[in-house]
């Protein structure tokens, strides 16, 4: 009888984690779980917030995050709809950029800061390609998931703006966003190319 209880508990725990690729996962109920290096997670939490998280390699447990809030009142400073940050193992922010709203003009900035915080410019090409493919696939997959009604409007808007931007030419994207390095710009364009597939 105990083995049935153990099996049921195992099934319920794994029901919260949906692997999309070998290194990107959807977490339906954010709680304590083991994260792997170079692993990415799109996480729902009980407060209605939604997080994109990447556990950096060789960084002593640092995580790059994009936090989407249903309303400003849900954010720690009560002023932000979205925050991009690097969180240390101890839970403090080493770097942070807050956004009072999400629009077509700042969506690429949000993505660029996240990629910068993930140290993608320093990563080998195969790791960068795996990251881009896994993230774009998982971002689209979460919009089709059983939990999509729990997504905050900020994430839905972010996806809508990225979809609009991805339809532009590379030259339009480069001219519209010039705050990043050449390497980061190339990563953004590769991501948007991957993102617009199957839209």
Image (cartoon, rainbow, N blue to C red):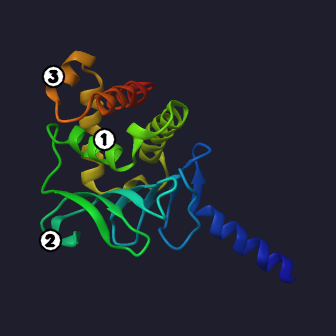
The residue where tag 1 is placed is: 159
Quadrant of the drawing holding the C terminus: top left
Which of the two discs, 3 and 2, labels the residue nearer the N terminus?
A: 2
The residue at 59%/42% (across/down) is: 21
Circle nearer the viewer, 1 or 2: 2
Q: Is residue 186 left or right of residue 146?
A: left
Task: Give the secondary structure at mark 1.
Answer: helix
The residue at 58%/58% (across/down) is: 36
The residue where tag 2 is placed is: 78
Placement of 182 over or under 160, stated as above or below: above
The residue at 33%/66% (across/down) is: 48
Task: Give the secondary structure at mark 3.
Answer: helix
Q: Is residue 155 left or right of residue 36?
A: left
Which of the two discs, 3 and 1, labels the residue nearer the N terminus?
A: 1
Give the Cα separation between the discs numbered 3 and 2.
33 Å
The residue where tag 3 is placed is: 175
Which of the two discs, 1 and 2, labels the residue nearer the N terminus?
A: 2
Q: Is residue 115 left or right of residue 55?
A: left
Number of numbered discs present? 3
Q: Callout 2 environment at 10 Å: few (<14), some (14 to 19), or many (20+)?
A: few
């Amino acid at each position: 009888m105990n083995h049935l209880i153990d099996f049921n508990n195992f099934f319920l725990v794994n029901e919260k984690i949906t692997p999309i690729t070998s290194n990107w996962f959807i977490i339906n109920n954010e709680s304590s779980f083991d994260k792997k290096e170079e692993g990415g997670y799109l996480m729902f939490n009980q407060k209605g917030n939604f997080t994109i998280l990447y556990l950096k390699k060789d960084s002593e447990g640092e995580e790059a995050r994009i936090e989407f809030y249903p309303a400003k009142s849900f954010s720690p400073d009560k002023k932000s709809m979205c925050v991009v940050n690097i969180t240390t193992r101890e839970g403090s922010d080493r770097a942070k950029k807050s956004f009072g709203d999400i629009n077509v003009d700042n969506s690429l900035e949000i993505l660029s800061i996240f990629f910068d915080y993930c140290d993608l410019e320093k990563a080998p090409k195969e790791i960068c390609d795996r990251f881009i493919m896994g993230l774009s696939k998982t971002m689209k997959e979460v919009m089709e998931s059983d939990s999509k009604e729990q997504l905050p409007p900020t994430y839905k808007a972010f996806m809508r703006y990225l979809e609009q931007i991805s339809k532009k030419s590379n030259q339009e994207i480069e001219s519209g966003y010039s705050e990043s390095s050449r390497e980061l710009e190339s990563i953004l364009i590769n991501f948007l190319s991957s993102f617009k597939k199957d839209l």
